[in-house]
Image (cartoon, helix red, strand yellow):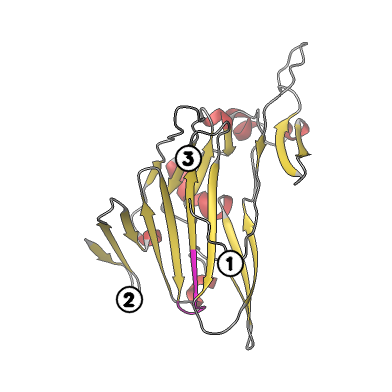
Amino acid sequence: MGEILDSKRRVAYYLQNNGTFVIDNYDLAKPFASFLPGIAGIFGIPMWVFYVNRGQAIASFGTENKDNAILEFFPANRAWQNVSFRGFRTFLKIEDDEKIVCYEPFQNNIMAGNFEFTRKMLIRSNDFSIQENNQSLDLNIDVDYFTLENEPLSCLARRVVIKNVSKTRKKISVLDGLPQIAPYGVSNWILKELSRTIEAWMQVKYVTKENIPFYKLAVEPADCAKVVKIKGGNFYYNYFIKDSCISK
């Protein structure tokens, strides 16, 4: 079934033979929200992932419950509003022989009105993807989300693939990631009610040879005589592979 929302893009829902549920131009469809199932295997640690059909989809994620969020939790009505600004974002600077263009895929802002593109969301049993095919820039951008299984840590993996489908060479500069990460040990109530005060307890340590940032509170923010040190932490690590052929 489908619904005409403008003269250029059409919303459609269908099921592929392999069980993948597809939403063409998902960002124009009626809003919905869902969770990944959190499958981690016998030896893994589950992660909850809350996603919506706006922006780059991921509205929040974390471990155990919303008091252990890595990306702050908001209910669906707030998530639809916030995800395009507080979720994952990708900024592209494209240079060729003729001009320089700056563009942010998966957004429906004023800048997006200058380009022709189609978008798609593909939902599977334990992962999902979003795609944008930009005919104006001759670029295809694919983003895959999945959680790790049977690993000693809980993790949301995100893979971004940018492909030049034109016959001309392009120089592309990329800025990609999250605007903010919640340090380990900050409850949902504190994030909502004491977000400025709790900054005094926050710290970032750089660990391993790659200097991966490790976000945590120094101690529990409790009003008591006993000081309890926080041992856990949240981390964010990204890497770039040119001409990559990575498979999940």
Picture coordinates of residue 23, whole percent (x, y): 33, 58
Task: Please identify, in this view, whether the residue under mark 1 or under mark 3 is nearer the observer.
Answer: 1
Q: Mark 2 or mark 3, which has the lower sequence index? A: 2
Residue 243: give its label. Answer: 1
Which of the 4 image quadrants contains residue 131?
bottom left
Give the residue drawn at x 77%, y 15%.
227
Q: Which is more N-terminal, label 3 or label 1?
A: 3
Tag 3: residue type?
Val
Q: Is 221 or 134 nearer to us in this picture?
A: 134
Q: Height in image: 134 above or below 25?
A: below
Q: In 3D space, how far apart are the residues under numbered discs 1 and 3 (Cα atoms)? A: 29 Å
Q: Is residue 139 magenta?
A: yes
- Of callouts 2 and 1, which one flags the residue occurring earlier in the amino acid sequence? 2
Residue closest to the eye, 197 or 136: 136
Residue 27 lies, with reference to residue 66, above or below; the image says below
Q: CA distance from mark 2 to mark 1?
A: 36 Å
Q: Residue at the bottom extreme?
A: 98
Query: What kind of residue is marked 2?
Result: Ser
Q: Which of 68 and 21 lies nearest the eye of the viewer?
A: 21
> How far across and how far down the image is residue 83, in percent?
51, 51
The residue indicated by pointer 3 is 49
Residue 95 percent coordinates (x, y): 64, 79
Q: Which residue carries the number 2 mark? A: 7
Bounds of the magenta span?
135-141
Quarter holding the N terminus? bottom left
Q: Name the amino acid, label 1.
A: Asp
Q: Check disc 2 and report its element: helix, strand or loop.
A: loop
Report which quarter residue 187 is drawn in: top right
